[in-house]
Image (cartoon, rainbow, N blue to C red):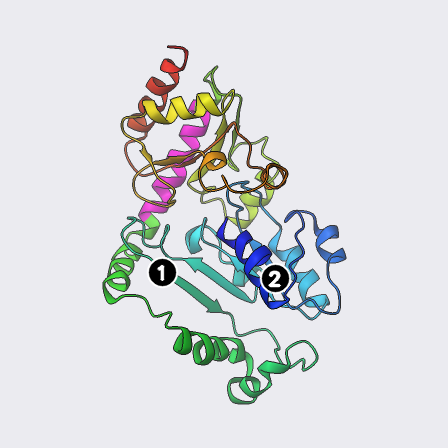
């Protein structure tokens, strides 16, 4: 949501126009590029649509047009996917999510692969001084000198410490997130109250094959969405939960649920919500690392009470 607001609203105030296309439609991606385009931005795994773009294809398109590919890798982390190895030039993370893993610190990270030639003076004239000084690390140098220093984006020391603690258990946590999410998805598929389940680990997911390849067979992430009959049923389901938390964060050790239609996207016009795949029947579940039997039991008892 915040990415869309940044691109559609904030950037527009500075006369920067973002063109939105389906992340998995490579033909549309190529067609959207023009002489003024400066970069291509994708999420490794879309939130909350959970679409999986082919990063190698996207990188080839970007580089054919002399553009960098910037990838948000927050939802899968380097445990599942390393976009720089698939052709991306810059990777970003909200460290608040899985990298920290405990919902107790805020932060972000920019990783420059140091492979993109920023010396195209027609597209990146403001990077010229940084190219002369840092060569392939010109972008990172500009971010550091202009934005990091001037805008005060340094995280709080305690938040940095907590994030470093979280990184120690990233691999263990991601294994459990992925395993639990797969079991929960299968559990929900068997429930008559559930109209549909969207998870890349399911064979019928349109991005399943791409995810299996790009994520190296290590899992499919810890987030899924599922649908009930209507928003009233969604509200009841959340109200009846006893273990699962009703929170907007993702990537926490705890399982978290939210109804995006009436919370994060409440102020969005209906047509835009539909375009972003935010329907009134959708619940987003960030599956935690609790005993999966406890997660399924809580979902089950809540679904059992929908008819009450």
Residue at 32%, 66% (x, y): give it: 155
| 9 in magenta | no
Q: Nearer the viewer, residue 100 or 173?
A: 100
Q: Position of residue 36 (x, y in %)?
A: 71, 69
Residue at 45%, 29% (x, y): give it: 185
For the stretch drawn in magenta, what is the main secondary structure? helix
Residue 216 in the image: above or below residue 274: below
Q: Position of residue 5 (x, y in %)?
A: 53, 53
Tell me the element at label 1: loop
**Marks 2 and 1 close (CB-CB < 8 Å):** no
Tell me the magenta residue range: 172-187
| 173 in magenta | yes
- Left or right of 205? Residue 308 is left
- Left or right of 286? Residue 64 is right
Q: Quadrant of residue 222?
A: top left
Residue at 31%, 49% (x, y): give it: 101
Q: In the rendered image, which residue does mark 1 sit on?
A: 107
The CA span between labels 2 and 1 is 25 Å
Q: Position of residue 163 (x, y in %)?
A: 29, 58
Closer to the observer: label 2 or label 1?
2
Tell me the element at label 2: helix
Which dot marks residue 298?
none
- Left or right of 247? Residue 192 is right
Q: Residues within 10 Å of mark 2 (few under 14, many from 20)?
A: few
Q: Quadrant of residue 204?
A: top right
- Left or right of 54? Residue 260 is left
Residue at 41%, 52% (x, y): give it: 79
Q: In the rendered image, which residue does mark 2 sit on?
A: 12
Q: Residues within 10 Å of mark 1 (few under 14, many from 20)?
A: some
Residue 160 in the image: above or below residue 281: below
């Amino acid at each position: 949501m915040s990415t869309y607001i940044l691109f559609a609203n904030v950037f527009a105030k500075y006369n920067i126009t973002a063109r939105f296309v389906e992340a998995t439609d490579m033909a549309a991606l190529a067609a959207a590029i023009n002489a003024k385009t400066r970069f291509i931005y994708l999420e490794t795994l879309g939130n909350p649509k959970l679409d999986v773009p082919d990063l190698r294809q996207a990188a080839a398109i970007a580089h054919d047009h002399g553009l960098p590919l910037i990838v948000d890798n927050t939802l899968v982390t380097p445990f599942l996917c390393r976009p720089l190895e698939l052709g991306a030039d810059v990777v970003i993370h909200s460290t608040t999510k899985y990298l920290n893993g405990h919902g107790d610190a805020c932060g972000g990270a920019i990783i420059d692969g140091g492979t993109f030639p920023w010396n195209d003076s027609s597209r990146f004239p403001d990077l010229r001084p940084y190219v002369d000084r840092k060569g392939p690390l010109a972008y990172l140098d500009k971010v550091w000198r202009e934005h990091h220093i001037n805008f005060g984006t340094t995280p709080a020391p305690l938040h940095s410490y907590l994030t470093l603690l979280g990184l120690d258990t990233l691999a263990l946590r991601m294994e459990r997130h992925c395993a639990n999410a797969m079991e929960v998805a299968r559990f929900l598929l068997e429930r008559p109250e559930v109209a549909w389940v969207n998870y890349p680990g399911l064979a019928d997911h349109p991005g399943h094959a791409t995810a299996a390849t790009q994520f190296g067979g290590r899992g499919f992430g810890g987030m899924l969405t599922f649908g009930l009959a209507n928003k009233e049923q969604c509200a009841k389901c959340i109200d009846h939960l006893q273990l699962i938390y009703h929170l907007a964060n993702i990537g926490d050790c705890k399982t978290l649920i939210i109804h995006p239609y009436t919370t994060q996207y409440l102020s969005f016009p209906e047509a835009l919500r539909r375009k972003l795949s935010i329907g009134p029947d959708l619940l987003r579940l960030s599956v935690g690392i609790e005993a999966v039997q406890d997660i399924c039991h809580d979902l089950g008892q809540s679904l059992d009470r929908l008819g009450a």
